[in-house]
Image (cartoon, rainbow, N blue to C red):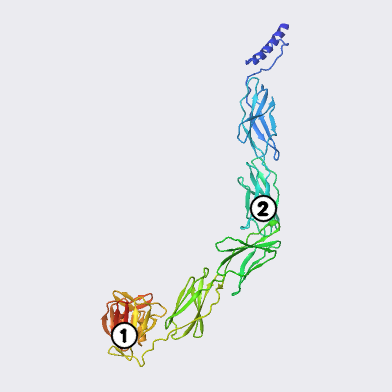
C-alpha cells in the first residue's frame, strides 16, 4: 500500500516535470481496487497559449474612455499584453493584465482620435499570436467660437465656427422665433465649419448652436448665438426737379429697430467710394450740387444694434441732366431746306430733340443719341424759322439746360415768268428756265436758286447704262406740267402743255402723244422713288438738254 502511494506521487511529479520540459503527459489512473490513489482529469499542456479572439471596443455615449473585451482561449497564459495604435501609427505596448482577465478600460485617450487595439496571451515559454484588431474613434471635441452674421450683399446669414476636429461632421440646431417657435436640425456633410442659411426672413429672430458628431458619439453644443435678420430698405429712387442744381435720394424704411442708415454712392464703372452715415428713421438724402452728365448709382442698408446690418437695397440708377450741345449752326441750303449742326458733348444722352418755331407753331423733331446734324426739309420759302436743341436721357427723364433760339430765314423761291404756260411746237412760250442737276446731289438749281429735287427724300440723279435718270416731278411741275402714277400698271404719265409721255417701269416701250416709241434705258424704282431717263423725257417735251462731263451735270433749258 505505501509503495503504491509513493508510485502515484512519483507519477504526478513526473507529469509536471515533463510539462516543464515541453512534453505532454496523461495522468495515470488508480489501480483497480486501490482507493488510496488520487484520480485527476486529463491535462493537455502546450508551450504556446492560443490567441485571444473576438476583441471588441466600445464606450458609453458622452464618456471619454475605450472599453475592451475579448475571449480567453488558453489555460496556461501568465497574463495578457494589450497594444494600441493611434491615428494609424505603430502599435505600442499599452499595458499587461493578469491571467484569466478578459476586459480592460483605457482611460488614457483624447477626443477626436482614431485608436486601434490588439491583445495577445503571454505563455510560460512563448506568447500567442495577436487577436483581431478592434477600432474605436473617441467622441469629437466641442465646436467653439460660433458667430452669425447677416451677409450685406445677399439674403442669408453666415455661420462660422472653430471645429477643433478631424473626424467629425456637424449638426446645426436652429430655432426660429416667429408666430410659432420652430426648432430644426441641419446636418452638414464633410468637415465644413461654415454654413449659409438662406431660409431666413426679415424681422425674425434666429438662434443657432452647433454640435460635432462622429460615427460613435456627439459632442456637447457650442456657444449659442442669436441674430435678427434686418429688413433692407426698398423703393430707392431719385427725386429731381428740372432746372435745379440738386436732387434727393429717397427710400422706404422697413425696420423699426435700426440705429442708423448707410447710403453708398458710385458712378458707373467705379466702386462705391462715397459713404454717408445717416441717423435712424432717415428716408431721404439731399445732394447739392449735382454733377452733370453722370450715371449715378445708390444703395442703402440699415444698421442695427451690435453692428448688425441689413442686406443692401436694390441699386438705384439715375442719370443727371446731360451736357447741353454747343456750337449750334443753322444754314439755309435752299428755299425749303435748313441744315443744323452742333457739337455733341454728352456721354449719357439717349436722344436729341430739336424744337422748331415758325409759322406760329412749335414742332419737336426727335433724333437718336450721338447725333450732331440734321437737315430740316419741306420748309416754306422766304420764311424766318427759329431752332433750339436739347439732349435727353429718357431713362431718368432729364434733359440738358435751355439754349436760346437761333434764327434762320429761307430764301425766296425763284418766281415763274408771268403769263400762262403753253407749249407750241415743242417750245415753252413766255417761260425761260435753266435747271442744273448734278449726279449724286439731292439739290437742283433753277435760274440760280437752289432747292431740293425731291423734298425731304434726299433723292439724287444717277447714271445707269450710260444714261442719267432722275425723279422729274420737280422739273415738270416747275414748268406747269404734271406727273401721274398708276400703281397697278406701274405706269408713269408725264404731261406738259400739249405733250403727254407714257412710260412703264422696267420697259423700253413708251408712248408720246399716242405714238409708240422706245427708249434706250427703262425707268426704275430706287428707294421707293420712280427714276426716268431725263434726256428722253426732256427732248420729247421740247426741252433742250446739255451734259457737262467736267462737273457731272445735266442742264435743262426751256424758252431758249
Report the side of 340 relative to 486 (left or right).
Answer: right
Whether residue 533 is visible to the viewer of this picture, yes or no, is no
Count of numbered marks: 2
Q: Earlier in the sequence, mark 2 or mark 1?
A: 2
Dot 1 lies on which element?
strand
Tell me the quarter of the image containing the C terminus. bottom left
Relative vertical location of residue 106 with respect to residue 407 in this rendering, above or below: above
The one of 38 and 230 positioned closer to us in this rendering = 230
The residue that mark 1 highlights is 557
Q: Position of residue 7 (x, y in %)?
A: 69, 8
Determine the image quadrant of residue 501.
bottom left
The disc label shown at residue 178, or none? none
Relative vertical location of residue 94 with respect to residue 7 in this rendering, above or below: below
The one of 297 and 36 positioned closer to us in this rendering = 297
Q: Position of residue 306 (x, y in %)?
A: 70, 56
Q: Residue at coordinates 67% horizontally, 26% vertically from top-left? A: 80
Dot 2 lies on which element?
strand
Categorize mark 1 by other alpha carbons within 10 Å: few (<14), some (14-19), many (20+). many
Q: Residue furthest front?
A: 327
Q: Position of residue 397 (x, y in %)?
A: 56, 72
The one of 85 and 42 positioned closer to us in this rendering = 85
Contact between marks 2 and 1 (CB within 8 A): the answer is no
Tell me the quarter of the image containing the N terminus. top right
Disc 2 versus disc 1: distance between alpha carbons?
93 Å
Whether residue 191 is visible to the viewer of this picture, yes or no, is yes
The one of 269 and 27 positioned closer to us in this rendering = 269
State which mark lies toward you, 2 or 1. Answer: 1
Relative vertical location of residue 468 with respect to residue 262 in this rendering, above or below: below
Categorize mark 2 by other alpha carbons within 10 Å: few (<14), some (14-19), many (20+). many
The disc label shown at residue 148, or none? 2
Amino acid at each position: 500500500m505505501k509503495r503504491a502511494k509513493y508510485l502515484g506521487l512519483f507519477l504526478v511529479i513526473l507529469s509536471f516535470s515533463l510539462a516543464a520540459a515541453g512534453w505532454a503527459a496523461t495522468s495515470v489512473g488508480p489501480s483497480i481496487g486501490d482507493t488510496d490513489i488520487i484520480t485527476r482529469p486529463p491535462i493537455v499542456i502546450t508551450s504556446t497559449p492560443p490567441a485571444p479572439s473576438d476583441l471588441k471596443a466600445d464606450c458609453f455615449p458622452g464618456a471619454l474612455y475605450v472599453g475592451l473585451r475579448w475571449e480567453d482561449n488558453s489555460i496556461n497564459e501568465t497574463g495578457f499584453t494589450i497594444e494600441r495604435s493611434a491615428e494609424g501609427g505603430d502599435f505600442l505596448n499599452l499595458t499587461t493584465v493578469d491571467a484569466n482577465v478578459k476586459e480592460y478600460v483605457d482611460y488614457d485617450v483624447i477626443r477626436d482620435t482614431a485608436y486601434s487595439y490588439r491583445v495577445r496571451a503571454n505563455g510560460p515559454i512563448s506568447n500567442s499570436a495577436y487577436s483581431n484588431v478592434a477600432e474605436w474613434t473617441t467622441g469629437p471635441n466641442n465646436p467653439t467660437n460660433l458667430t452669425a452674421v447677416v451677409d450685406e450683399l445677399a439674403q442669408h446669414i453666415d455661420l462660422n465656427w472653430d471645429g477643433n476636429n478631424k473626424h467629425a461632421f456637424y449638426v446645426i440646431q436652429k430655432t426660429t422665433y416667429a408666430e410659432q417657435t420652430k426648432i430644426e436640425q441641419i446636418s452638414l456633410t464633410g468637415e465644413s465649419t461654415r454654413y449659409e442659411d438662406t431660409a431666413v426672413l426679415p424681422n425674425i429672430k434666429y438662434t443657432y448652436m452647433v454640435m460635432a458628431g462622429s460615427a460613435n458619439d456627439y459632442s456637447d453644443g457650442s456657444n449659442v448665438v442669436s441674430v435678427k435678420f434686418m429688413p433692407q430698405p426698398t423703393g430707392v429712387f431719385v427725386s429731381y426737379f428740372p432746372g435745379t442744381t440738386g436732387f434727393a435720394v429717397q427710400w422706404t424704411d422697413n425696420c423699426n429697430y435700426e440705429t442708423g442708415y448707410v447710403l453708398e454712392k458710385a458712378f458707373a464703372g467705379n466702386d462705391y467710394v462715397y459713404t454717408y452715415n445717416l441717423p435712424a428713421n432717415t428716408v431721404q438724402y439731399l445732394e447739392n450740387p449735382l454733377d452733370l452728365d453722370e450715371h449715378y448709382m445708390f444703395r442703402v442698408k440699415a444698421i442695427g444694434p451690435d453692428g448688425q446690418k441689413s442686406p443692401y437695397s436694390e441699386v438705384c440708377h439715375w442719370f443727371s441732366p446731360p451736357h447741353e450741345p454747343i456750337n449750334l449752326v443753322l444754314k439755309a441750303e435752299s428755299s425749303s431746306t435748313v441744315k443744323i449742326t452742333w457739337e455733341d458733348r454728352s456721354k449719357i444722352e439717349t436722344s436729341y430733340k430739336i424744337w422748331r418755331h415758325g409759322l406760329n407753331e412749335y414742332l419737336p423733331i426727335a433724333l437718336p443719341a450721338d447725333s450732331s446734324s440734321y437737315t430740316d426739309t419741306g420748309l416754306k420759302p422766304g420764311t424766318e424759322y427759329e431752332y433750339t436743341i436739347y439732349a435727353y436721357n429718357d431713362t431718368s427723364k432729364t434733359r440738358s439746360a435751355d439754349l436760346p433760339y437761333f434764327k434762320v430765314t429761307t430764301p425766296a423761291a425763284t418766281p415763274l415768268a408771268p403769263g400762262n404756260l403753253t407749249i407750241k411746237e415743242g417750245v415753252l412760250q413766255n417761260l425761260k428756265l435753266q435747271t442744273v442737276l448734278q449726279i449724286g446731289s439731292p439739290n437742283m438749281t433753277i435760274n440760280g436758286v437752289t432747292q431740293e429735287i425731291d423734298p425731304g427724300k434726299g433723292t439724287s440723279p444717277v447714271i445707269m447704262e450710260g444714261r442719267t435718270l432722275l425723279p422729274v416731278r420737280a422739273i415738270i411741275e416747275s414748268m406747269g406740267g404734271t406727273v401721274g402714277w398708276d400703281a397697278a400698271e406701274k405706269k408713269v404719265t408725264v404731261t406738259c402743255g400739249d405733250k403727254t409721255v407714257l412710260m412703264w417701269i422696267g420697259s423700253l416701250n413708251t408712248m408720246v402723244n399716242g405714238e409708240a416709241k422706245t427708249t434706250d434705258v427703262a425707268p426704275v424704282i430706287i428707294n421707293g422713288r420712280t427714276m426716268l431717263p431725263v434726256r428722253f423725257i426732256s427732248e420729247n417735251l421740247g426741252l433742250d438738254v446739255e451734259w457737262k462731263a467736267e462737273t457731272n451735270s445735266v442742264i435743262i433749258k426751256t424758252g431758249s
